[in-house]
Image (tube, rainbow, N blue to C red):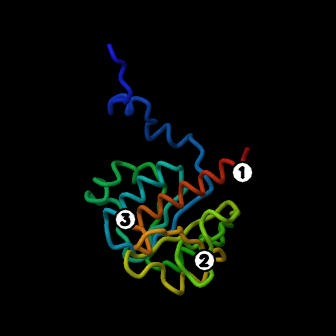
Amino acid sequence: MKSKIKRTNDELKADRPSLEEIKQIPRLPISILVENVRSVHNVGSIFRTADGFGASKIYLTGFTAYPPREDLSKTALGAENSVPWEHFENPIDAAEHILKSGQELVLLEQTMNSKNLYDLDYPFPLCFIVGNEVNGVSEELSSLATIHVEIPMRGIKQSLNVSVATGVAGYEFSRLYSSFKK
């Protein structure tokens, strides 16, 4: 008889920590500031990704959707209950709060000064900023970040979906932090 390769959904769920257990697992010194993201599905996906790489917090700002919302929860699959989050009406207030807490602001955006995401060393703790699906991060918020990075694009499109870009950056920062700690 051939042995199976894939784990079933029930097997995966059996290994998953409970909401109480997740509180005991150390989070990485990486947070996300989300500015004016229109799609509630993108926000739900950002929660799921943040849970996956161990983000310390998500700052939801402006008109970005925030829990509790059934449509957000449907995409987040419960991650909105496992990742700490806070909502700020004004993104600048959130950025100032983050800076006062000692985190470096890293802008994930194509700017005149942005560098390749994979070519830099980063100070931790950090908070990376992602923005609106059409307009990106506002000029005012962009000006508060001391590090500007972009994901290299090799095709005909110049950007990724905001939730996908959050995943790429979040996992890269997670990888760098984990290798830095060794």
Three-letter code for the amino acid on which mark 3 is drawn: Tyr
Mark 2 = which residue?
A: 114
Q: Quadrant of the N terminus?
A: top left
Q: Kindly report which numbered mark, 1 or 3, lies closer to the viewer in this rendering.
A: 1
Q: Position of residue 40 (x, y in %)?
A: 31, 65
Q: Does dot 3 land on a helix, a strand or a loop?
A: loop
Give me the C-alpha separation between circle 2 and circle 3.
29 Å
Q: Does dot 2 land on a helix, a strand or a loop?
A: loop
Determine whether, in the image, residue 35 is placed left or right of residue 176: left
Mark 3 = which residue?
A: 66
Residue at the image point whose x is 59% and y is 85% from the top: 112
Give me the C-alpha separation between circle 2 and circle 1.
23 Å
Quadrant of the image occupied by residue 11: top left
Residue 56 vs residue 133, the one in the foreground: 133
Residue at the image point whose x is 35% and y is 64% from the top: 42
Task: Answer with mark 1 or mark 3, whichever residue precedes in sequence.
Answer: 3
In the figure, 121 relative to 26: above or below? below
